[in-house]
């Protein structure tokens, strides 16, 4: 109760005009220093807008040749042949989407479990330790994930995971073929490890921000702990969904770890055992090798494509999280 | 019937709650494994020589990565030159004058910017810096890292300045101090520790970045501190040595990873320490 009152005061305070505004209006002799200060900070803030604009412009400008040459065919063509100067991005789009989806399918239940455990079940001391470790997991650089993936996880997948899968479920097209280790499955697994901390920690925050009254009401009606948690999860669903999209955005743009385990071959294959290639990996591998201008423009167009996809996913995520915080502030008032 | 239903609910409750505990345990396995493998592979290689010597040519054993450590420090420095002023001042603007539409747009932009893949930022730095200068350079790498720092610093600066009680600003203004001085000398100073924490956090992030350096700073097997030329970095060193077909180089990659992880862990512990003492200061 006290906490919510405090929160309300804070939101009220936020609505009070910023300190400068009232003063500026009331005094005619606006201090020159004030104006200069405001102008200077505004200038640096404006640079963020300019930078964002430049980023978009540079990518469009840098890919004009390829945009003009291939048009929409760029995203539907499967052929990537730098020697013949034929560029189609479909294998990379496919690799990016499929590896991220594999990761998402594995990561969603895992991170929900972790989030529920941290927010609802763990005692405070355990929660603190676990939260710190989850944060640490999120802070490990992707190159270290890649190194570990290459030398530890890939051999493990090749020897322990893929043989039984192909033996028992080999009739499924996704588990067909020889177990290489390097491939789509490895990429999906390493991405899972990388996005679980993100989804779990944001979902935990979403769960924790659900008003206490919701839980108390459920308990008062005789719900078990789990039944209460399902209600809490339902209440926080837009926040959790936003967290998932943020994780997806991270997976789509992840470069190093994926490049080191996916096998880097521009083919489209239904089997997760086969190697693949992603948009980010092709940039990492071929950007310095782009010998002709059209080749370079095609690569920059891939960057533009990747940028557009991740921006859309991230904007959706932010929108959902805003919705979440709005419903909660309304729930607190009711 | 109702008793059976009751037991069923209890059983489901117990089952699902323990599954959630299992999930928490499973997630920690990779963390522990990564630490275990990095330490067990890397610890044998790390020595004073490894940290202070230059890389040796193929075939010769030994050698170190002094140039990569120095390169990473230079890149962090360059990134901070770009990222810190923009980040901090934009944060100040958003906190003090940020009740207009422009500020909301900027907030949204920084949120979105923080989701842009780092390799895309590398591509942009390539087209802005490398193409016109016709030269891979530390400068281009630092530029890319700087852009990546901006969202984190802007957000933490704004949040920390907003935490400073309103009465501080009013007290300053009531004493007849101009607003810019109030903001700089009172508000910014009170929030300084939190802002520094945000900067440390963003440095911890960019210290581990590889993708935006691949075609900007490129990497360098030789000693270089010239910001207009390619420069080595810890992360690109790990990438190159991990893919090399020599076992000794692979082991050196593990050792470099151990150094990198240690740096980042120390930075995030510093972050924890600072942020905790800040909250304690508030309560007292």
Image: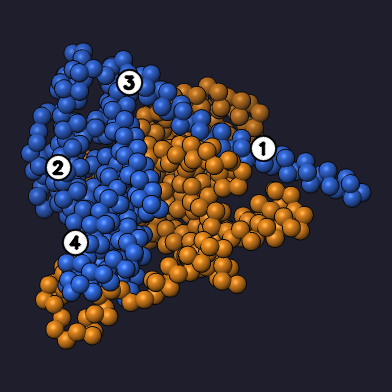
Chain colours: A orange, B blue
Q: Label 4: which residue?
A: B185
Q: Nearest to the eye among marks 4 and 3: give it.
A: 4
Q: Report the residue at 16% width, 50% height from top.
A: B81
Q: Label 3: which residue?
A: B42
Q: Label 1: which residue?
A: B18
| Subunit under mark 2 | B
| Subunit under mark 4 | B
Q: In the rendered image, which quarter is residue B163 located in?
A: bottom left
Spatial CA span between label 3 and label 1? 36 Å
Q: Label 2: which residue?
A: B138
Taking the image as shown, residue A268 lies to the left or right of residue A162, namely left
Question: In the rendered structure, which disc, 4 or 3, sits on the residue that comes first in sequence?
Answer: 3
Q: Is residue A91 visible?
A: no
In this figure, what is the number of numbered marks?
4
Tell which of A113 and A78 is nearer to you: A113
Mark 1 closeness class: few <14, some 14–19, many ≥20 residues within 10 Å: some
Asked if the residue at tag 2 contacts the one at tag 3, i.e. Cβ–Cβ closer than 8 Å, the answer is no
Spatial CA span between label 4 and label 2? 35 Å
Spatial CA span between label 2 and label 1? 51 Å
Mark 2 closeness class: few <14, some 14–19, many ≥20 residues within 10 Å: many
Question: In the rendered structure, which disc, 3 or 2, sits on the residue that comes first in sequence?
Answer: 3
Q: Position of residue B210 (x, y in %)?
A: 28, 39
Question: In the rendered structure, which disc, 2 or 1, sits on the residue that comes first in sequence?
Answer: 1
* Secondary structure of residue under mark 1: helix
* Secondary structure of residue under mark 3: helix
Numbered mark located on residue A62 in the image: none
Spatial CA span between label 4 and label 1? 53 Å
Question: In the rendered structure, which disc, 3 or 1, sits on the residue that comes first in sequence?
Answer: 1
Question: In the rendered structure, which disc, 4 or 2, sits on the residue that comes first in sequence?
Answer: 2
* Secondary structure of residue under mark 2: helix
Asked if the residue at tag 1 contacts the one at tag 4, i.e. Cβ–Cβ closer than 8 Å, the answer is no
Question: In the rendered structure, which disc, 4 or 1, sits on the residue that comes first in sequence?
Answer: 1
């Amino acid at each position: 109760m006290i906490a919510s009152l405090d929160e309300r005061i804070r939101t009220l305070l936020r609505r009070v005009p910023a300190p400068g505004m009232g003063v500026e209006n009331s005094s005619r002799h606006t201090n020159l220093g004030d104006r200069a200060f405001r102008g200077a900070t505004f200038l640096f803030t404006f640079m963020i807008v300019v930078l964002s604009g430049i980023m978009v412009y540079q990518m469009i400008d840098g890919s004009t040749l390829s945009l003009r040459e291939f048009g929409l065919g760029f995203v539907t063509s499967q052929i990537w042949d730098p020697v013949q100067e034929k560029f189609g991005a479909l294998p990379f789009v496919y690799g990016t989407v499929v590896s991220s989806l594999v990761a998402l399918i594995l990561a969603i239940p895992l991170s929900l479990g972790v989030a529920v455990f941290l927010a609802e079940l763990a005692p405070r001391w355990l929660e603190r330790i676990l939260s710190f470790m989850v944060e640490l997991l999120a802070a490990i650089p992707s190159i270290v994930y890649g190194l570990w993936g290459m030398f530890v996880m890939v051999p493990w997948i090749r020897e322990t995971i893929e043989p039984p899968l192909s033996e028992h479920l080999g009739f499924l097209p996704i588990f067909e073929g020889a177990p290489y280790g390097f491939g789509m499955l490895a990429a999906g697994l390493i991405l899972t490890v990388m996005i679980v901390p993100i989804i779990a920690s944001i979902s935990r925050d979403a769960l924790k921000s659900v008003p206490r009254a919701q839980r108390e009401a459920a308990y008062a009606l005789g719900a078990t702990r789990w039944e209460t948690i399902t209600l809490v999860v339902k209440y926080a669903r837009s926040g959790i969904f936003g967290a998932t999209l943020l994780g997806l955005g991270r997976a789509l743009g992840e470069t190093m770890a994926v490049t080191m385990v996916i096998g880097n071959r521009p083919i489209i294959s239904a089997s997760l055992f086969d190697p693949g290639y992603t948009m980010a990996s092709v940039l990492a591998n071929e950007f310095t090798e782009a010998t002709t201008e059209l080749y370079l423009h095609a690569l920059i167009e891939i960057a533009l494509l990747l940028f557009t996809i991740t921006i859309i996913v991230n904007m959706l995520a932010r929108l959902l999280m805003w919705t979440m915080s709005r419903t909660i502030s309304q729930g607190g008032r009711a | 019937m109702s008793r059976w239903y009751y037991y069923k609910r209890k059983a489901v409750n117990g089952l699902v709650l323990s599954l959630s505990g299992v999930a928490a345990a499973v997630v920690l396995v990779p963390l522990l494994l990564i630490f275990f493998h990095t330490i067990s592979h890397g610890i044998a290689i790390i020595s004073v020589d490894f940290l202070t010597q230059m890389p040796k040519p193929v075939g010769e054993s030994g050698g170190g990565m002094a140039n990569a450590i120095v390169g990473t420090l230079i890149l962090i420095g360059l990134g901070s030159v770009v990222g810190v002023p923009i980040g901090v001042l934009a944060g100040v603007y958003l906190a003090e004058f940020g009740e207009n539409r422009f500020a909301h747009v900027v907030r949204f932009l920084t949120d979105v910017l923080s989701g842009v893949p780092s390799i895309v930022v590398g591509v942009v730095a390539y087209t802005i810096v490398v193409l016109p200068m016709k030269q891979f350079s530390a400068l281009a790498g630092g530029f890319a890292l700087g852009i990546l720092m901006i969202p984190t610093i802007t957000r933490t600066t704004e949040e920390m300045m907003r935490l400073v009680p309103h009465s501080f600003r009013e007290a300053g203004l009531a004493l007849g101090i101009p607003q810019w001085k109030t903001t700089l000398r009172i508000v910014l100073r009170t929030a300084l520790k939190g802002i520094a924490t945000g900067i440390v956090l963003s440095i911890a992030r960019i210290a581990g970045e590889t993708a935006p350096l691949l075609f900007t700073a490129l990497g360098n097997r030789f000693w270089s501190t010239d910001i207009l030329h390619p420069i080595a970095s810890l992360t690109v060193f790990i990438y190159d040595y991990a893919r090399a077909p020599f076992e000794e180089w692979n082991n050196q990659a593990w050792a470099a990873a151990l150094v990198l992880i240690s740096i980042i862990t120390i930075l995030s512990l510093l972050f924890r320490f600072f942020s905790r003492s800040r909250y304690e200061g508030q309560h007292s």
